[in-house]
Every structure is written in structure tokens, then in C-alpha cells.
Amino acid sequence: DLATGSISNRRPFVVIPETDGNPDGMTVDSEGFIWCAHWGGWKVTRHDLTGKVVATVPVPVERPSSVAFGGVKLDELFISTADQGISDDELKRQPFSGALLRCRPGVTGLREFEYAG
């Protein structure tokens, strides 16, 4: 309700199975679709306006933590990852843990709103 600021008619946008990890950082692309990093899920997913997964970007790390569009044309998706809580042996198998990954998903992002004050 815009007048009172109260929220009603709550419902899940998407339900992510436990096997897909936990939803973490998200962003919105120029088509209004949501991109979600899956902490513990080895991937990033793109969800349409109904919540359906329409694209999956597998990543070489267990813990992608957030996503953001960048580049001159906002056509690059940057994926931050974490190495927190990963053993030394596991880090040898996941050498990109803690790195910033980049891909071109075929869609563009939105410009960030800038503070005008």
C-alpha cells in the first residue's frame, strides 16, 4: 500500500531447492529479469517475471556470492565469489574461489541510480 507503506498479498517469487544452494546476491537486467548467485550451488540463474529459471551460468566455484552488470555497454556480468570456510584441499580444486569472474550473458544490465544530492 503506497499510502501506508504496508505490504500485503505476500508470496514467494521463486522457491530454490536445497540442492541448488542458497540465494545470495542478485541484480536485475534490462528485461526486468532477476539474476541470482547461488551460495553453495555452483551457479548463477536468471529468472523471468514468473520466477521460472530461463538461463543458468555454471561457475567453477561452490560459493558465488553476488552478481552485477558492468562494462561500457553493461553487457558483462560480474560474479563475485568467496573462499570463506573452504579448506585448503578444496581451494586446490576450486582455485577461483575468492575471485571476481566475468561473462557475457547476451543481455544487458541497468544503470545504477545515482544519488542526486
Image (cartoon, helix red, strand yellow):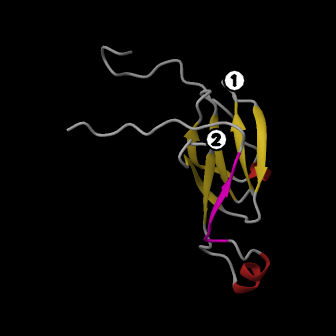
The structure residue drawn at horizontal position 72% and vertical position 77%, both measured from the top left corner, is 95
Query: Is 92 rendered above or below residue 74?
Result: below
Query: Is 91 rendered above or below residue 105?
Result: below
Amino acid beneath label 1: Thr
Q: Give SS at disc 2.
A: strand
Extent of the magenta region? 97-104
Amino acid beneath label 2: Trp
User: Which residue is tagged 2?
Assistant: 35
Question: How much space separates mark 2 and mark 1, taking CA atoms?
Answer: 13 Å
Residue 66 location in percent, x, y?
A: 58, 53
Question: On the picture, is 100 further left or further right than 105?
Answer: left
Give the quadrant of residue 79: bottom right
Q: Is residue 80 magenta?
A: no
Front residue of 88/18: it is 88
Query: Can you see residue 101?
Result: yes
Q: Earlier in the sequence, mark 2 or mark 1?
A: 2
Q: Give SS at disc 1.
A: loop
Give the quadrant of residue 101: bottom right
